[in-house]
Image (spheres, rainbow, N blue to C red):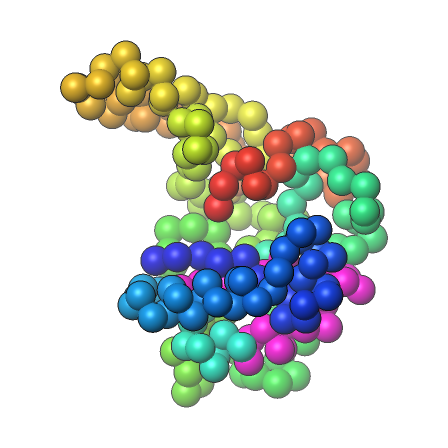
Amino acid sequence: RVNISLDTLRPERFRALTRVGDLQNTLNGIEAALNAGFERIKLNAVILKNRNHDEVIDLVDFAISHGIDISFIEEMPLGVIHDHDRAEVFYSSDDIFSDLNQRYKLIPTTESTGGPSRYYRLIGHSTRIGFISPHSHNFCEQCNRVRLTAEGRLLLCLGQENSIDLRRSVRANPLDDAPLRKAILDSMHHKPRGHDFDLNEQPVIFRHMNTTGG
Ligand code: SF4
């Protein structure tokens, strides 16, 4: 399974939203993932009002034409940014749902990937459409996710700083993974109940998503 960020299908927007990106590289990557035979490929699209909200149907059309899934995500206030006001550009999952309903009939499912997406199906297509709605439909009570950074830090919540250093455990016990297992299990006692995101306040998490990893 592989998740790929794709917020727009327009090259100039892609560069503006990612600051450095080249849309064609991402499209090539999607083709490469399809050719490599991944069973479930999912696009993740963060939708912002007046930035890319007019592309939600185009993005679903793209997902359908490639036989892959797509999740729409409400922007999370991670890290300090200066190029937009997060409250002003907020575009809720309900807004997206209503836009998509003009073209498609979305059928709710009970499917889950163990993550926070609420999934819908489309008649006659294999594509699933997910909604990740940290602001409008808080999902923290169902969360079973932790994330491992490239430096070996296990982050216990995207919206809090709680973490443990697994690299130290691995380096101290290179031939024995029992301490690592214990560290992971013990860390679950420190997993926060949820985030404290508030779009009208300055972010309390200074870690940008790209330092966390997908
Ligand atoms: S508990 Fe943390 S990681 Fe889980 S869904 Fe909420 S904010 Fe995200």
Quadrant of the rendered image containing residue 5:
bottom right
Queried whether the magenta region covers residue 51, the answer comes back as: yes
| Residue lying at the far left of the rendered structure | 175
* Residue located 48% across and 46% down the image: 214
Total label count?
0
* Residue located 52% across and 68% down the image: 27
- In depth, the one of 197 and 13 nearer the eye is 13
Q: Quadrant of the N terminus?
A: bottom left
* Residue located 52% across and 36% down the image: 212
Tell me which segment is drawn in magenta. Answer: 41-61
Queried whether the magenta region covers residue 129, the answer comes back as: no
Q: Position of residue 192 (x, y in %)?
A: 50, 29
Q: Position of residue 184 (x, y in %)?
A: 32, 26
User: Residue 6 vs residue 199: left or right?
Assistant: left
- Give above or below for 97 relative to 177: below
Residue 98: in sight, yes or no?
no
- In depth, the one of 13 and 154 nearer the eye is 13
* Residue located 72% across and 64% down the image: 13
Residue 57: in sight, yes or no?
yes
Q: Position of residue 56 (x, y in %)?
A: 64, 72
- Give above or below for 36 relative to 157: below
- In depth, the one of 88 and 79 nearer the eye is 79
Q: Position of residue 72 (x, y in %)?
A: 58, 62
